[in-house]
Image: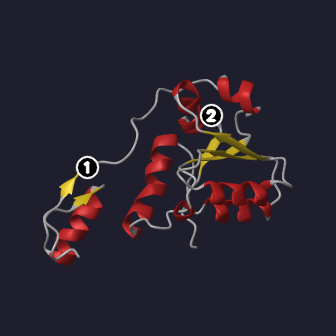
Amino acid sequence: MVKYADEIIVLSKSAQEYFKSAYNRETVLIHNGIERPTKKDAKNITEQYGLEKDGYISVVSRLTAEKGIHYLIDAYNKITTDKKLVIAGDTSDTDEYVAMLKEKAKDNPNIVFTGFISGDTLKEMYTINLGGTAVGTALNANPVYVTLLAPTLSRISGLPVTKADD
């Protein structure tokens, strides 16, 4: 596929370098991500979802199987913590998958589904130093991305962030 593509779009400099070294192909770099939000106090997320500083683990995502949120719920259900698991996002023509996620979570009152969020509420959720911990599965991510993500999040947040081996 790479050999015959007219153009290849990549999301990071590391992916661009990978395609150049592995396939000798030039690519178009279009960054995929968000603007770094202005730090916000936890007003909306406290009022709407009862979230407090240092009291939650969060993921903001489309709720689709390839994002691996079901693995996150399974892992969370196996640990003992006073931190809530906050899943911010909604269906993307994946109603059955979202129903399955909610079924997995139904017996754990500390798993909070916010649905789609935006505006100041989303900015508050993205403000990592509010006490939230950003998590993700990176199931389909380039391994280079996963290796670079933890130190980048650590540098931005000033907190220790590590990559899981699995």
Q: Quadrant of the N terminus?
A: bottom left
Disc tally is 2
**Residue at figure coordinates x 79%, y 65% from the top left:** 78
Q: Position of residue 45 (x, y in %)?
A: 67, 30
Marking on residue 30: 1
**Residue at figure coordinates x 53%, y 50% from the top left:** 92
Q: Which residue is mark 2?
A: 130
- Element carrying mark 2: helix
Q: Position of residue 110 (x, y in %)?
A: 81, 47
Q: Quadrant of the C terminus?
A: bottom right
**Who is closer to the viewer here, 6 or 33?**
6
Give the residue type that dot 1 points to: Ile
Q: Position of residue 119 (x, y in %)?
A: 52, 26
**Who is closer to the viewer here, 82 or 68?**
68
**Who is closer to the viewer here, 47 or 3?**
3
Q: Position of residue 5 (x, y in %)?
A: 17, 69
Give the residue type that dot 2 points to: Leu
Q: Residues within 10 Å of mark 1 (few under 14, many from 20)?
A: few
**Residue at figure coordinates x 48%, y 48% from the top left:** 153
**Residue at figure coordinates x 28%, y 63% from the top left:** 15
Please identify the quarter of the rendering in which residue 95 is found: bottom right
In this rendering, would 142 be left or right of 84?
Answer: left
